[in-house]
Amino acid sequence: MATYDEIDEALVDYTESCNTNERLRKMQRDWSRTLHFVCSDTDDTFTMEVVSGEITGTPKGHVGVPDIVVTTDSETFCDMFWGDLNPVAKYLRGEIKVKGSQEDVMRLDAISYVIWPDA
Amino acid sequence: MADEPAGPGTIQLRRSVGVATATATSAGLAFAAIDYLGVVSIMAYAPGASGWLAILIGAGLVFLVAGIFSELNGLYPTAAGIRLYLGRALGNRTALTVTFTYMTTVVLVIAADAFLIGAAIRHVLHEPTALAYVWIVVLLVVATVANLRGVVLAGWVQTVVTYTVLASTVVISIVAIFHVGGAFTTPLNLFGNGGFSGIQAIAFALFLFAAFEWVTTTAEEARTPKVITRALFLAPVAIWIVSTLFLLALSHLVPFSVLHNSAYPQLLLGKAAMGTIGEIWMLAITILTALNTFNGGFLVSSRFIYAAAREGNLPRGFARLNLQAVPWMAVVTLAGVSAVLAAVIFATKQWLLLVAVGATLEAGIYALASVSLLILRRKETRERPFQLLLGKPLAVVGAILFTVFALATGFADPKNTKHLSLAPIGVIAVLALISVLYVRLYVPRLHAQAAARAAASARPKRRPPRPSTPPSDDTGDPTVSPMEP
């Protein structure tokens, strides 16, 4: 079980990796979304604001109306944001639950794939 | 149609799908240009106007399918639902094999629609036959470029297109039914060509609804789980009304001998009912169906291929994304395979074989879904948002009936209804064999290659190790993820 501080540390690294990746920024330039995350085991929640492909904030709690809601356990979130696991496998096994359009679900995975193609 | 509000505690999405949109999605995925040929296939086995009975019985059976998919979707409300419930019920390898075979129906429908629309355009423009293939290639190129550029039909456009297609078909059909000069013959004699022919007519009627269940892939966008359940029951009603009217209109006004050799019965009906205006109207409607088929078909299949490649079950190249975040290799491959298939249909004129193959695959999937429901009733005892009343006996009935229907169309020869043919079941056997061999022989190699790559690159975990903490009695080693073996 990961603490919120551990997730936050992963989020900081994830944000930097995303925002400094030129190819990803170009690919996601038309993608502005509010993402809500729910840790199923700790009940921690956090938000990610993406504006034109740039992650502009990852505040604690749920802020605004979401376009996508991602639910899984805290450990999976941590590993996912550190790029240590491939989220698709877990998604296809039903261990990561996503509410949102298929297109957004794919875009979300595409971020991890572009930053960490070997994950 | 008002959508019910989500329950307390449910997080509402900014954009979510309601009943009207979900119903349009379901009906739009099912009602493609090939459905007009599906109606002609029913008429080949049900004499005169009696095909309406086959469609009625087919619609009743599709209600059973809707109930089965509603329960399964409630258990696994995700785009990957079919993989999940087939996997849990029948094992992962079987699920992968079935899903690969199932996805070929999408390619078949894309190819068939490209062919049918190309043939219809050529017919109306009075062009030489060979030009039909040029239109097919133009259509596929336009669809491919639009997909590669990330163009996706907005939900409301899809809804408008679907309801326009359905409403227009109804209007032309009603005009044809009340047209002076036609006649209904043997409207109640479904088994007039023999008992087995009647069963084959019902089996082909099932094909009219094929792919309506794909709306479950939008489960993650639905406002509430009930939205998908309602769409699964409402869309078949819409298709039943449209198909019945279209069949009655055809049997009233267009001789079957003319229909049987035509790839565009809807144009013949339009012309018979309203002259050139009717023909052009039906051509426009046929082209509109392509928007849904190409938009939905390319999207569903290419995203499935992307996910399979990311999971390591297809070569990694299929997960490559272009700058519009589109899996370009998947889209280009789909278009290429569709173009080749359309060329084969064009050269052999075997479009009715495609209908038979599609009908067999769909009935087979319904049988497997019934079996999955039976197994999951035993394995998954958790509460479902929708539970099919008398689920176990109905699933047994479904498994038997849909297997019979799959065999009825699998050995059908719609070109010569007095004979049985091995062609449809043969095509499916080849597709299934390729899937089985791929999953059994090639997928393990892909996994081994991935493992070798990972070992060679030996990328250390980026996540920093936790400072050591004394082990606790109830959680064991806190650094071990509970999700990972």
Image: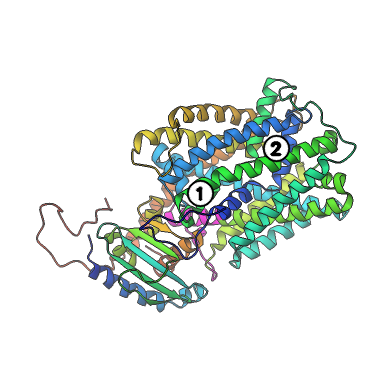
Residue B34 lies in quadrant: top right
Q: Circle 1: is it few (<14), some (14-19), or many (20+) Cα within 10 Å?
A: many
Q: Which residue is rendered at x = 43% and y = 45% of the image? A: B74
Q: Position of residue B314 (x, y in %)?
A: 48, 52
On what subunit does the disc labeled 1 rest?
Answer: B
Label 2, label 1: how far apart the Cα atoms are: 32 Å
Disc number at residue B353?
A: 2
Q: Give the residues in magenta.
A: B300-324
Q: SS of the residue at dot 2?
A: helix
Q: Residue at x 40, y 71 (%)?
A: A64
The residue that disc 1 covers is B228
Task: Give the amino acid type for the residue marked by disc 2 in the picture.
Answer: Leu
Is B119 left or right of B433, judged from the image as shown?
right
Which kind of residue does numbered mark 1 sit on? Ile
Q: Earlier in the sequence, mark 2 or mark 1?
A: 1
Classify residue B63 by image quadrant: top right
Q: Is residue A91 visible?
A: yes
Residue B414: x and y, percent?
73, 32
Which coloring applies here? Answer: rainbow
Could you tell me which chain the residue with mark 2 belongs to? B
Residue A66 lies, with reference to residue A17, above or below; the image says: above
- What residue do we see at 44% from left, 35% from top? B373
Label 2: few (<14), some (14–19) or many (≥20) C-alpha neighbours in 10 Å: many
